[in-house]
Image: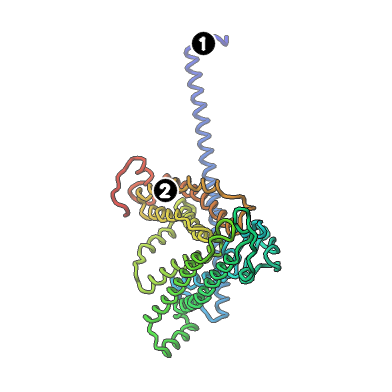
């Protein structure tokens, strides 16, 4: 009976038709359920975003209120804040940071790392501008007793004045670090310390004068500026020249200090060569900050460049949606730029200039910049892998080396995030963000674009 029923052609057609109806009904029901779930998820997301915006606005209003109360206690109103000249104010804050960095660098035991000898035994030495410690990264003073009686540090003057021990190895190499090497290190440190303290004077002046110039429209500072202008007959043009001169003097002293110290330090302390360490890197970091912010200030004071393109780029950043690939790409590039700047403490990594290409691409939406960035960042990633493989274990790193390695690792992984975010932006947002289609699609299609930027 069943065999006859299922082998009847008409019954087969009815059964197939009924099955199709059931499948269509099930599929339609599933699509309806999915649409309802998406609508509910979207409504929940919008509700949560609304609450987040409300909370952030409330926090912002509260922080502004606290700021205004604090400013009112010193006689400054919110209207006075609006009168501040923004670029000189930012540069003045940078000047404060630079002076702090200089103070930290001058008093730190990480200017040089080398291997010194005592009775034929090698010891790791960590030199400041005036003293030296002997030990390990975990305990830098553990081996001081082999060189001097002090437990905290050994004075370079003391080691320089010590009489050389004539003991040598069978090949004629001394078993003790020569006093001449300590004297050379002492001379290099004294010269650098003198230059830095002298340069500290224009550094403080540059910070103070830049702040006064930025805040001269505020009543409590305006009186000071007016007294200086009236008593010393100083015009605004002269004020600008003095401020620029202070920044130039600070820049020059930092550059000379770096050059003089690097050229004067001994080649060796008895075993191997010496290595410039994190305190020298802090001075290099301060030099880079002075170069950047000094150039920014001078260009603003004397109107040496048109800031229209920068303003346009900033507006494009601020107008990008908060939860979008474009905004995330901007933030990742800013974060990576900041990390590259901090990496100057350990060494200068010129692959940071790739951020400029990514920024031009994001601003001009041009495939040439995208292609150059992708090729060069891919090459840099390969070299980064080799560098990561050569790094020692963290236990054998000094604090400066560990700091640099940590920054390097974060920068390395950010490169992958940036590439992924570029792909997301090109795939899902580029068409709606600007005209002319996505640069990613242009690359795939072999599209031609002779202009380097819009």
Q: Position of residue 363 (x, y in %)?
A: 38, 55
In the displayed orientation, state which residue is furthest to the left: 450
Earlier along the polypeptide chain: callout 1 or callout 2? Answer: 1
Q: Which residue does the image show at 42% across and 44% down from the upper left?
A: 427
Count of residue discs: 2
| Residue count near mark 1 (Cα–Cα under 10 Å), binned few <14, some 14–19, many ≥20 | few
Residue annotated with mark 2: 376
Quarter of the picture containing the C terminus is bottom left
Query: Against 368, is 300 above or below?
Result: below
Q: Position of residue 186 (x, y in %)?
A: 57, 69
Element class at badge 2: helix
Residue annotated with mark 1: 7
| Residue count near mark 2 (Cα–Cα under 10 Å), binned few <14, some 14–19, many ≥20 | few
Q: Which residue does the image show at 53% across and 59% down from the upper left?
A: 346
Q: Position of residue 79 (x, y in %)?
A: 47, 77
Foreground label between 1 and 2: 2
Quarter of the picture containing the N terminus is top right
Element class at badge 1: helix
């Amino acid at each position: 009976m069943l065999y006859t029923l299922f082998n009847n052609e008409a019954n087969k057609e009815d059964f197939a038709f009924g099955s199709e109806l059931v499948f269509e009904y099930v599929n339609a029901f599933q699509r309806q359920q999915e649409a309802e779930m998406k609508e509910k998820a979207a409504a929940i997301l919008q509700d949560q975003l609304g609450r987040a915006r409300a909370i952030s606005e409330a926090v912002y209003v509260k922080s502004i209120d606290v700021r205004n109360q604090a400013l009112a206690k010193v006689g400054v109103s919110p209207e006075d804040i609006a009168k501040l000249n923004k670029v000189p104010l930012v540069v003045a804050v940078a000047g404060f940071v630079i002076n702090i960095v200089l103070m930290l660098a001058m008093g730190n035991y990480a200017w040089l790392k080398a291997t010194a000898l005592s009775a034929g035994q090698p010891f790791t030495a960590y030199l400041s501008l005036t003293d030296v410690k002997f030990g390990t990264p975990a305990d830098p003073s553990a081996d001081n007793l082999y060189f001097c009686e002090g437990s905290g540090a050994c004075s370079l003057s003391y080691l320089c004045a010590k009489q050389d021990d004539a003991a040598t190895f069978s090949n004629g190499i001394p078993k003790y670090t020569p006093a001449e090497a300590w004297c050379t290190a002492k001379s290099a440190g004294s010269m650098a310390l003198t230059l830095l303290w002298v340069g500290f004077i224009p550094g403080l002046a540059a910070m103070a004068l830049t702040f006064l110039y930025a805040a001269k429209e505020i009543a409590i500072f305006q009186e000071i500026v007016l007294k200086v202008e009236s008593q010393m007959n100083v015009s605004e043009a002269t004020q600008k020249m003095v401020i620029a001169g202070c920044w130039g003097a600070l820049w020059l002293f930092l550059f000379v200090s770096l050059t003089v110290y690097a050229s004067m330090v001994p080649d060796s302390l008895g075993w191997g060569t010496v290595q410039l360490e994190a305190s020298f890197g802090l001075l290099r970091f301060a030099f880079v900050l002075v170069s950047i912010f000094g150039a920014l200030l001078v260009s603003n004071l004397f109107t040496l460049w048109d800031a229209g393109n920068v303003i346009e780029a900033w507006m494009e950043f601020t107008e990008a949606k908060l939860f979008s690939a474009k905004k995330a790409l901007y933030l990742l590039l800013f974060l990576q730029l900041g990390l590259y700047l901090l990496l100057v403490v350990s060494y200068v990594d010129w692959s940071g200039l790739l951020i400029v290409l990514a920024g031009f691409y994001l601003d001009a939406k041009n495939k040439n910049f995208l292609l150059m960035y992708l090729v060069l960042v891919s090459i840099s990633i390969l070299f980064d892998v080799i560098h990561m493989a050569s790094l020692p274990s963290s236990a054998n790193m000094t604090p400066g080396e560990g700091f640099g390695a940590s920054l390097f690792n974060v920068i390395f992984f950010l490169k992958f995030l940036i590439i992924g975010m570029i792909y997301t932006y090109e795939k899902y947002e580029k068409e709606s963000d600007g005209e002319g289609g996505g640069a990613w699609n242009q690359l795939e299609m072999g599209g031609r674009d002779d202009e380097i930027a819009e």
